[in-house]
Image (cartoon, rainbow, N blue to C red):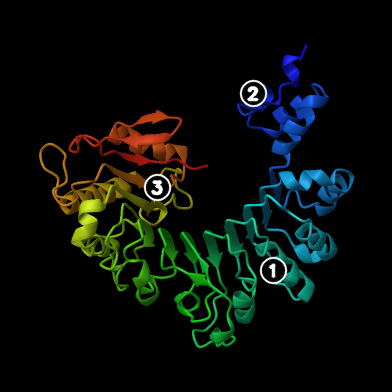
């Protein structure tokens, strides 16, 4: 008679309800049939940080149990000086991954050794990859293009920060490039020169989502091809004398996020950015989100003060912001937006500096605190499905 503990499907379903490595390690100790199922989750995500930077420890485990490499689906190297152990990092890059789909390389130091650059190229070339986050600020301008030669053709989601070099930089002959990789989404932080360069290895003609922190001006020429496919857009609206962001090319936006501050010079650009949306996006926009830098609006406690925050300044700025946005949405008495008929949600998120400020603002807005954050329901805004919330961050 087969033991219930020997049925892999049942065990797999049970372990799905667990979400910590300590739980999975406990499962692995129950009996032999539980080991493989637990190990596949323990090694699914491998994360190296400044507190856990021992490549050798993982390599020792994989030397003993090489089959575990096939369990790794996420590899993250975050703020580690890989130049201190280049040989181990090279071995990490050459493990023969078959199921690695997500790669994160962030906060790496300036590199000079060619074999370290080669190791990074090996990682971005793993054919199973679909998502890559690469902080490339440590690269030279030439390397910022060469790093993508031979990259996985399966990459669909890219988060990238290239080096901040002059726009006059000339790379290799673009006529020698291989077929470009077609992306679905990009999170870009950096100067516009890299994104606009003819040597870019990426095709954005079918781009569906873009989070742009490359300055106030979007690369309209490059994104012109994506004007019919782009559905989700996040932009940074800077105060005057910067120009507002021109959203006119994007005809079918469903989700729009605007990152800004509540200072007086920012509000006109914020409104002009929303006004630049074309009529087609008026009909398709479903979610509008504002991510607000509250620290540039609410002065922190001054030295020698009692430690309280100037919440009056922040509250006045929020009220003025709310009035402007309410006018832009053209809300009727029933809470429907005449300008954006498909709009079903408006979010406002802000990092809150201290619990004291949460409490003081909370009393003003009569917020209810729950595990998801702080939700605001302003008395003047009682529309059907629109809600505003503040998110408290640690």
- SS for dot 3: loop
Q: Are marks 2 and 1 in contact (CB under 8 Å)?
A: no
Depth-wise, is mark 3 or mark 2 nearer the camera?
2
Q: Alpha-carbon distance for marks 2 and 1? A: 39 Å
- Mark 2 and mark 1 lie on one chain; the one further toward the N terminus is 2
Q: Which mark is residue 121?
A: 1
Q: Which mark is residue 350?
A: 3
Q: Image check: 321 left or right of 196? A: left
What residue do we see at 66% from left, 22% from top?
A: 10
Q: Quadrant of residue 33?
A: top right
Q: Are marks 3 and 2 in contact (CB under 8 Å)?
A: no
Q: Image check: 147 left or right of 36? A: left
Residue 276 x %, y %: 23, 65
Q: Residues within 10 Å of mark 3 (few under 14, many from 20)?
A: some
Between 241 and 187, the one nearer to me in the picture = 187
Residue 310 x %, y %: 36, 47
Residue 172 x %, y %: 59, 86
- SS for dot 1: helix
Depth-wise, is mark 1 or mark 3 nearer the camera?
1
Q: Alpha-carbon distance for marks 3 and 2? A: 38 Å
Q: Which mark is residue 14?
A: 2
Q: Is residue 298 visible?
A: no
Q: Alpha-carbon distance for marks 1 and 3? A: 37 Å
Outermost left residue? 333
What residue do we see at 50% from left, 88% from top?
A: 168
Compared with 375, 53 (above or below) is below
Between 215 and 337, the one nearer to me in the picture = 337
Between 322 and 179, the one nearer to me in the picture = 179
- SS for dot 2: helix
Quadrant occupied by the N terminus: top right
Q: Quadrant of residue 129?
A: bottom right
Outermost front residue? 1
């Amino acid at each position: 008679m087969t033991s219930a503990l020997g049925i892999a499907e049942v065990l797999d379903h049970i372990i799905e309800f667990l979400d910590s490595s300590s739980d999975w390690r406990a499962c692995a100790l129950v009996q032999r049939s539980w080991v493989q199922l637990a190990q596949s989750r323990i090694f699914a995500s491998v994360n190296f940080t400044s507190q856990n930077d021992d490549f050798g420890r993982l390599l020792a485990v994989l030397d003993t149990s090489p089959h575990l490499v096939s369990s790794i689906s996420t590899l993250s190297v975050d703020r580690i000086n890989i130049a201190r152990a280049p040989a181990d990092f090279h071995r990490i890059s050459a493990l023969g991954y078959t199921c690695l789909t997500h790669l994160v390389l962030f906060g790496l130091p300036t590199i000079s050794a060619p074999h370290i650059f080669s190791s990074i190229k090996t990682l971005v070339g793993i054919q199973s990859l679909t998502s890559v986050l690469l902080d490339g600020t440590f690269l030279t301008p030439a390397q910022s293009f060469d790093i993508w030669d031979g990259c996985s053709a399966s990459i669909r989601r890219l988060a990238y920060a290239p080096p901040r070099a002059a726009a006059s930089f000339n790379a290799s002959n673009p006529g020698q490039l291989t077929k470009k990789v077609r992306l679905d989404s990009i999170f870009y932080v950096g100067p516009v020169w890299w994104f606009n360069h003819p040597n870019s290895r990426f095709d954005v003609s079918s781009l569906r989502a873009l989070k742009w922190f490359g300055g106030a001006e979007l690369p309209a020429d490059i994104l012109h091809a994506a004007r019919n496919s782009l559905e989700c857009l996040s932009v940074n609206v800077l105060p005057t004398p910067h120009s507002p962001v021109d959203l006119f090319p994007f005809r079918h936006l469903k989700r729009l996020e605007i990152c800004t501050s509540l200072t007086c010079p920012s509000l006109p650009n914020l409104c002009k950015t929303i006004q630049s949306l074309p009529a087609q996006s008026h009909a398709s926009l479903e979610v509008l989100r504002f991510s607000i830098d509250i620290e540039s609006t609410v002065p922190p406690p001054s030295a020698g003060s009692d430690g309280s925050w100037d919440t009056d300044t922040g509250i006045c700025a929020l009220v003025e912001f709310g009035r402007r946005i309410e006018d832009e949405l053209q809300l009727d008495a029933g809470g429907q937006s005449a300008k954006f008929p498909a709009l079903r949600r408006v979010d406002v998120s802000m990092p809150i500096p201290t619990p004291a400020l949460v409490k003081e603002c909370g009393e003003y807005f009569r917020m209810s605190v729950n595990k998801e954050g702080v939700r605001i329901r302003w008395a003047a805004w009682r529309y059907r499905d629109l809600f505003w919330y503040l998110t408290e961050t640690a």
